[in-house]
Image (tube, rainbow, N blue to C red):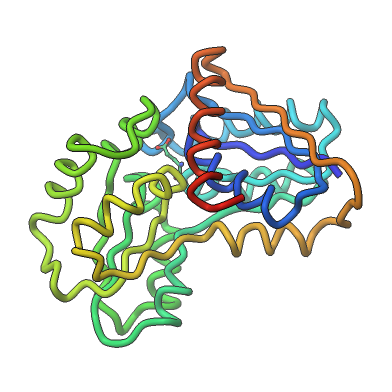
Amino acid sequence: MTIGIFDSGMGGLSVLSEARKQLPNENFIYYGDSKNAPYGVKTKEELINLSMTICDYFVERQVDAIVIACNTATSAAVKVLRENYDIPIIGMEPALKPAVDSHKSGDIAVMATPMTLSEEKFELLMKRVASKIMVYKIPAPKIVELVESGIVEGSEIDDVLEEYFSTLPKDTIESVVLGCTHFIFIKEAIRKLFDGNIKLIDGNYGTIQQLKRKITESNHGGSLEILNSGGSYYIELSNRLLHYLEEQNGN
Ligand code: DGL
């Protein structure tokens, strides 16, 4: 099978990496839209248009399923995409439910883009699964910009994280939900901010489990094509960041 995976840029590589781990015999086409990144500060209409352009391309390439490796594009466009394309479309949402399921007594912080956190879809999710728990919403667009420029560790990341958490009671936060695929790259920096005393939760494993339920698995294949609207600089950066992730994950 051929699976199309897209994101605003580098973040979805973390989903691609998980997909290659769980589905080693499928062919993947990864499309990063770095020319139009960041998505998290765009309007819903803009995101629907951008997502449809990418999905039209995937359909031309005859993919069997599409993964929206982006919480932001999912919030804005998944409904319209499912109405317009008759192949499986797998979306993502901040993994608040798993965070609540494994919750003990502390608070939960959700880091995501401004768009994801302000959409009604997220409000409904909070009401449905976390009505009795203190949930802090942390819009973190600066992290997206740093990861898009290839910075995933070091003082710039540490300073931005420090700033985002400065007004929150860090001692009471039990888990941080990584509600944007770009944030998978900065797990270590978040752990450091909490002196290792934090649970980090993301939706990548569950998203690929969902993809597995929607396709018939192949027993040969395993190719990968990485494309990016921003051109060769971003394709090289994508290869470098994918390698970084796969080394960390032991793929
Ligand atoms: N990686 C994206 C997400 O999961 C969006 C980042 C952005 O472009 O703002 O939400």
Is 189 positioned to the left or the right of 213 in the image?
A: left
* Direction left: furthest residue: 167
How far from the left and from the top, in percent, is residue 16? 62, 44
Task: Tell me where residue 39 appears, x and y as whole percent.
Answer: 43, 34
The tally of labels here is: 0
Q: Nearer the viewer, residue 196 or 51?
A: 196
Q: Is 182 located above or below residue 91 in the figure?
A: above
Question: Which of the two residues, 140 or 114, is positioned nearer the viewer here?
Answer: 140
Q: Position of residue 72 (x, y in %)?
A: 46, 45
Residue lying at the far top in this picture: please name it: 232
Which of the four quarters of the rendered structure image does ligand 1 lie in? top left
Name which residue lies at 82% across and 48% down.
Answer: 25
Q: Depth check: 8 or 20 in front? A: 20
Name the residue at 58% across, 22% down. Answer: 228
Residue at image point 48% right, 19% down:
35
Q: Residue furthest right?
A: 219
Give the vertical position of 204 relative to 32 (above or below). Answer: below
Q: Please give the name of the residue rendered at 61% of the width and 52% of the height, measured from the top-left corner.
A: 18
In the rendered image, which quarter contains the N terminus? top right
Residue 226 screen position, x and y as percent: 65, 27
Query: In which quarter of the view is residue 106 placed?
Result: bottom left
Does 93 sit above or below residue 74? below
Q: Is residue 232 left or right of residue 150?
A: right
